[in-house]
Image (tube, rainbow, N blue to C red):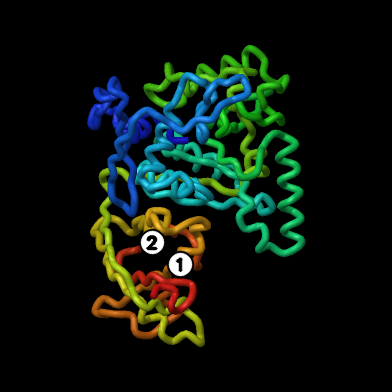
């Protein structure tokens, strides 16, 4: 996914104009930049990677590797990432959004789609269009993370969805990279397409409508697709030129089929320079849990107060991220790391202009509530009108942070 955006990939590999350590590679020395707990870390490694011997006596990298045996950048990044954590097994059972945050230092947001609800395909397509045109890294997954928490009927629906998707080439649990989106006129009708890449290069592709094997692809339609000016200045980029039947893991599908095969979209948001933000670091001990009629102490959790005032704007978008330290970064801990984390959530409330603290709960002042999840980071985005607000971070249960 990271490799789909050349600028961000170059920053990760320290080979950009602003950050260049490539002169050391001739000595077998590589430098990578990661982020951990919101801080940048530069990791220096040599060019030796763990290998195993194939039946033909040829050595191949033991862990991650490129499809092309002459390329080693995947193995080198993995080695540097493992060194950052002190051991290879610390990389087990990870989440895509956490890995993207660690590699790029950007905020990652999850967007969940229910294939069984009436989601507007036009609005979703426009959302994906804005994200891809603004060089956001976007991953799409048919996730089965919470299947065991579903009721019997919902679980059966999800299992049927997995079987249907697999029959058409989409594998549950894989995170496919969104390369771009296209609009074509087919038989006089506007057709919206998304272009995806299988994370396993050369892996299985979509075999349904508008796949590489679909007879709909006439020479004229292929020309229409590849002569579109997807983004200004990107006409000549090979990323935007589609090749058919190459076994490269890249395929197109209609937005309607996309909605029926994927239920989670991971978005890396790199905020523009005109965004303003503030960062708080701290801890609370003990924590007092979530709002509940029997939990009268929940307002004893930390309260962060901020204001939004503007003479011109009637509203503004506010993005809030609450993170806890990554247990993978602690050398003495072993998988599963989820057991080492607290369930995090938050409550945002409107305040009076002279109010200094929220002392009692008033439902009319509630702006939003983010239910607790046992994730390293929880994220919300909302529109606020001018005024004074109080953000209260919460744990799922009282005493989770001790």
Q: In the image, residue 73 lies at what x, y percent?
A: 42, 28
Residue 216 pos. (x, y %): 70, 21
Helix, strand or loop at label 1? It is loop
Q: Is residue 387 above or below residue 130?
A: below
- Residue 191 in view, yes or no: yes
**Coordinates of residue 352 in the picture (x, y in percent):** 30, 77
Q: Residue at x 35, y 63 (%)?
A: 385
Report the quarter where the C terminus lies. bottom left
**Residue 184 seen in the current view:** no
Q: Which mark is residue 296?
A: none
Q: Is residue 2 above or below residue 58?
A: below
- Which residue is the site of mark 1? 342
Q: Mark 1 near mark 2, Cβ–Cβ under 8 Å? A: yes
SS assignment at label 2: loop
On residue 324, the disc is: 2
Residue at the spot 61% in from the left edge and 18% down from the top edge: 246
Nearer to us in this view, 132 or 331:
331
Q: Residue at x 53, y 50 (%)?
A: 93
Q: Is residue 76 above or below residue 321?
A: above
Total marks in image: 2
Per the model, the C-alpha gap separating discs 1 and 2 is 8 Å
- Quarter occupied by residue 378: bottom left
Around disc 2, counting alpha carbons within 10 Å, would you say few (fewer than 14), some (14 to 19), or many (20 or more)? some
* Pointer 1 or 2: first along the chain: 2
């Amino acid at each position: 996914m990271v490799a789909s955006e050349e600028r961000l990939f170059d920053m990760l590999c320290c080979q950009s104009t602003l950050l260049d350590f490539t002169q050391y590679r001739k000595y077998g020395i590589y430098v990578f930049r990661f982020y951990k707990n919101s801080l940048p870390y530069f990791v220096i490694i040599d060019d030796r990677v763990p290998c195993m011997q194939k039946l033909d006596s040829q050595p191949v990298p033991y862990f991650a590797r490129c499809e092309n045996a002459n390329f080693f950048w995947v193995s080198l990044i993995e080695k540097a990432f493992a060194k950052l954590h002190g051991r290879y097994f610390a990389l087990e059972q990870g989440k895509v959004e956490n890995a993207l945050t660690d590699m790029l230092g950007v905020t990652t947001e999850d967007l969940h789609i229910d294939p069984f609800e009436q989601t507007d395909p036009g609005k979703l397509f426009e959302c994906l269009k804005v994200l891809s045109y603004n060089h956001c890294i976007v991953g799409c997954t048919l996730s089965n993370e919470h299947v065991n928490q579903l009721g019997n009927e919902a679980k059966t629906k999800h299992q049927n969805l997995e079987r249907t998707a697999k029959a058409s080439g989409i594998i549950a649990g894989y995170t496919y990279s969104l390369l771009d989106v296209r609009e074509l006129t087919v038989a006089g009708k506007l057709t919206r397409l998304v272009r995806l890449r299988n994370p396993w290069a050369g892996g299985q592709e979509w075999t349904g409508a508008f796949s590489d094997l679909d007879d709909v692809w006439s020479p004229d339609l292929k020309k229409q697709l590849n002569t579109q000016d997807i983004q200004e200045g990107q006409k000549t980029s090979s990323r935007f030129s589609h090749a058919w039947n190459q076994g490269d893991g890249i395929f197109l599908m209609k937005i309607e089929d996309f909605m029926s095969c994927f239920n989670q979209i991971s978005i890396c948001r790199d905020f523009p320079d005109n965004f303003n933000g503030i960062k708080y670091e701290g801890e609370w001990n003990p924590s007092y849990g979530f709002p509940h009629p029997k939990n009268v102490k929940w307002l004893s959790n930390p309260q962060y107060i901020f204001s939004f005032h503007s003479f011109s704007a009637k509203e503004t978008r506010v993005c809030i991220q609450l993170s806890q330290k990554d247990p993978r970064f602690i050398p003495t801990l072993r998988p599963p790391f989820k057991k080492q984390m607290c369930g995090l959530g938050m409550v945002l409330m409107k305040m009076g202009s002279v109010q200094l603290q929220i002392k009692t709960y008033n439902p009319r002042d509630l702006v939003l509530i983010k239910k607790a999840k046992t994730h390293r980071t929880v994220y919300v985005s909302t529109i606020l009108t001018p005024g004074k607000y109080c953000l209260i971070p919460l744990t799922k249960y009282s005493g989770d942070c001790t």
